[in-house]
Structures are given as C-alpha cells and as structure tokens.
Image (cartoon, rainbow, N blue to C red):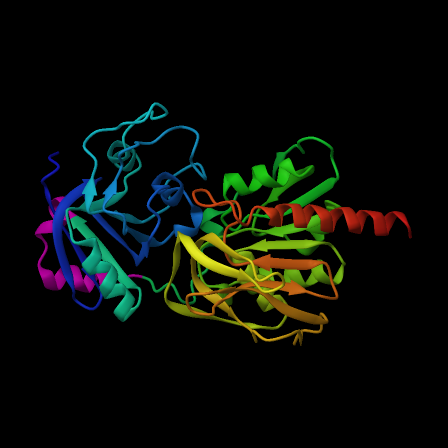
C-alpha cells in the first residue's frame, strides 16, 4: 500500500473531498463529526462514545506521538472512520509502541488524509453533522452517484441505540484503592477506562454491569451507589435505561452520571432531549458552574443535550422533587449539568475524567464520594 493511494470523503449533501488513503483500505460509513482537541487522538479513537461516527480531527498534524499500550480508553478502536489533514510520517515519543497508521490498519479502520479539514469543519458547522462515507481501495473507483447512494443508505444517529454494541456482556470488578467507602454499580453504556480508575481511587469497589442489567439484578448487588457512563447513540432510544434509573432514584441510592448518563438522568427526571446541530467534541469547552461562577475548561463528546430551564430550581416532571441546572456551556447555553435537590443525584454532560484533556472538573469524583459517605452515614444512623 502506498500513502498516496486515492481516497474520497463524501457527505450526504453531495459534498466531496479527495485525498489519500489512511489506515485500512475499503469503505466506511458513519455520522461525520469533528473534534477540536489538539492532543489525545488515541483516547479519542478508543472512546466507545464515537461508535457509529467518522471522526475528523481539526488539529492539522496527527500521529506524531504514535500509539502506546497505556492510553487506550477501551479494548479497541470504536470510530467508524478517521479523517486527518497531515499524518505524521515519523513517531517521536519514548512511550510509543507503534504508529497510528499501523494501528488503524490492524483494526480495519478506514481513514483519509490530505484533505482540507478546515473546509469540512466549516461545512459541518454550517449544515450540521450528517451521514458520510470514506472510500478507498477498490471502492474509490465507484461512481460518484454510487458512492453518494451508499452514504445516503447509512443509518441516522437520531433514534439509534448503540449501547448493546459497546457494553460488556459480563460483570467486571475493580477493587477500591485506599480506604474503602462502599461499592458502585457502573452501567456500562460505553464507559472509559479512566472513569473506572477515578471511581476506584475514591475508595469504591467498582462493579461494571452490562447495559441489559435489570433493576432486580442491579439491586441484588446491594451497591452503595450507581453510576451511568458515557456512550453513543440517541438518549431518546434508551427507555429501558431510563426506567432502570427511575428505580434507582426511588430506592434513594446516590447517583452520578457522565455525558450519556446526564442525558438519561434528564429523561428519568421527566425532561426531554434534543440533537445539537454539530455537537460539542474536544477538550477546550468553557463551562460555568452556576453555584460558584467558576469557569472550567472541559472535555466533551456529545451530539445530544437535555432540554431544561436554565434559571432557578424547577419541579421534576416525573415527581422527583426540585431540580436545577448546575452547569451551562458558555458558547451556546447548552445544559451541561443537572443537580437534584431532594434526592442524592447529579450529573454532568462533559467528561471530568478528561482523557485526554484538562482536569478542571476532576473534583466531581470527590463530590460523588462525599455523596456516598453521607448516604452511608445516614443509613448507619437509622
């Protein structure tokens, strides 16, 4: 294979970008999205939340630090395809165990390089994310009409439930680090490894459970708390997870949700969700904590958001008492966090584990730990 083999990136509106094949050769279909992080491409492509999506890196030079065996956020690459402008020809990092290009080839991920990623980003910002396809190898020779028809035959992200594709199928355990304060059942909707490590570091035995877990199975574990992870897909297509969470909230168990978990808490509280035009993806999103006025630079990966009033507490439409929006995105006023005032539950839309990214929001894991400690003390006094 030559790094100058032809490839084409096709959007469902008919826009085409010609470039060079990168990674595996063949055909890849998925929702085209862009991420603005200048670092962390290995964490990005192994984040299960990107399942079903072709990811474009807005940073122009990608691959210079190669890949290693420590920074993966899951057991495999999840992006459907990968779009970069200028892939590095040389790996320059002492931790590297291989090149990004080789890793893409090994796992069959079709990519494209050498295109104007700024132009694609502007197109997606103007028109919104859309279905797309990368064609290389024999598929690059297909007619433009055939390629566009293939792209338009792909699945829409709206209404799509992808949790079963990314979740574990058997329970998994991680021991608490340091002083043990209890256990947390983590519903795996596409959880990242760094999240599990941060939970264990707060003194929690971590029990990762499949997304198909029932309320009876979850409560039989007798967890001290419950956590809903990030993950791909449309929250409106996850009714079973919403019903499970409502059972958890009625049981009075402390709850913390991240990203997809924030959207599902919103639904469990009786709120709606909606699809953003082009989403938030990257490690430089400014979010304000409404309680303190503190602005945090945060890591994001979401294309859906919760629809909730931004000003003051409001009553949960589902009967769980008062709720408030705790965090707001300063770029577009999107809800970035929910805090239940009458039950022990909160969530954020962004990634406090920040792999990769800033660690401004890492304190949220401490907040969850405090919630569990208080709940344990309350049970001990009753």
Q: Nearer the viewer, residue 232 or 323?
A: 323
The answer to whether residue 152 of the structure is visible from this angle is: no
Tell me which corner region of the image, top left, top right, bottom left or bottom right, holds residue 246. bottom right
Q: Is residue 115 above or below residue 123?
A: above
Residue at the image position 60 percent from the left and 58 percent from the top: 347
Tell me which corner region of the image, top left, top right, bottom left or bottom right, holds residue 152. bottom left
Q: Is residue 239 left or right of residue 344?
A: left
* Residue lying furthest right: 382
Question: Residue 85, image x and y in percent?
Answer: 19, 47
Residue at the image position 18 percent from the left and 32 percent from the top: 89
Q: Nearer the viewer, residue 179 or 22?
A: 179
- Residue 251 forms part of the magenta stretch: no
Q: Nearer the viewer, residue 201 or 22?
A: 201
Q: Is residue 273 above or below residue 357?
A: below
Question: Residue 261, image x and y in percent?
Answer: 56, 57
Q: Is residue 325 left or right of residue 52?
A: right
Write down the region rendered in magenta: 136-154
């Amino acid at each position: 294979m030559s790094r100058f083999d032809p490839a084409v990136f096709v959007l469902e509106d008919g826009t085409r970008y010609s470039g060079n094949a990168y990674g595996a050769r063949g055909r890849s279909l998925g929702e085209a999205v862009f991420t603005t992080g200048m670092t962390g491409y290995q964490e990005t492509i192994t984040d299960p939340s990107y399942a079903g999506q072709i990811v474009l890196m807005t940073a122009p030079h990608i691959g210079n630090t190669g890949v290693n065996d420590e920074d993966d956020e899951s057991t495999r690459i999840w992006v459907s395809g990968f779009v970069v402008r200028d892939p590095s020809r040389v790996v320059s990092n002492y931790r590297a165990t291989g090149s990004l290009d080789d890793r893409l080839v090994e796992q069959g991920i079709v990519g494209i390089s050498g295109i104007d990623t700024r132009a694609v980003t502007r197109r997606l910002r103007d028109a919104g994310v859309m279905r797309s396809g990368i064609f290389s190898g024999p598929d690059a020779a297909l007619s433009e009409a055939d390629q566009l028809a293939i792209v338009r035959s792909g699945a829409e992200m709206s209404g799509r439930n992808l949790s079963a594709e990314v979740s574990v199928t058997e329970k998994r355990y991680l021991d608490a680090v340091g002083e043990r304060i209890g256990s947390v059942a983590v519903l795996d909707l596409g959880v990242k490894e760094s999240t599990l490590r941060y939970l264990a570091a707060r003194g929690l035995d971590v029990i990762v459970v499949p997304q198909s877990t029932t309320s009876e199975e979850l409560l039989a574990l007798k967890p001290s708390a419950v956590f809903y992870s990030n993950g791909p897909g449309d929250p409106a297509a996850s009714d079973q997870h919403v019903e499970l969470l409502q059972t958890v909230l009625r049981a009075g168990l402390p709850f913390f949700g991240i990203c997809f978990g924030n959207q599902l808490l919103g639904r469990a509280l009786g709120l709606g969700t909606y699809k953003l035009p082009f989403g938030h993806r990257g490690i430089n999103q400014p979010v304000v904590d409404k309680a303190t006025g503190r602005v945090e630079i945060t890591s994001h990966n979401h294309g859906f958001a919760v629809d909730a009033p931004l000003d003051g507490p409001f009553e949960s439409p589902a009967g769980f008492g008062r709720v408030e929006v705790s965090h707001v995105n300063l770029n577009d006023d999107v809800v970035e966090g929910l805090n239940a005032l009458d039950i022990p539950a909160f969530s954020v839309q962004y990634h406090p584990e920040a792999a990769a990214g800033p660690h401004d929001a890492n304190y949220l894991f401490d907040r969850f730990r405090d919630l569990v400690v208080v709940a344990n003390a309350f049970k001990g006094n009753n």
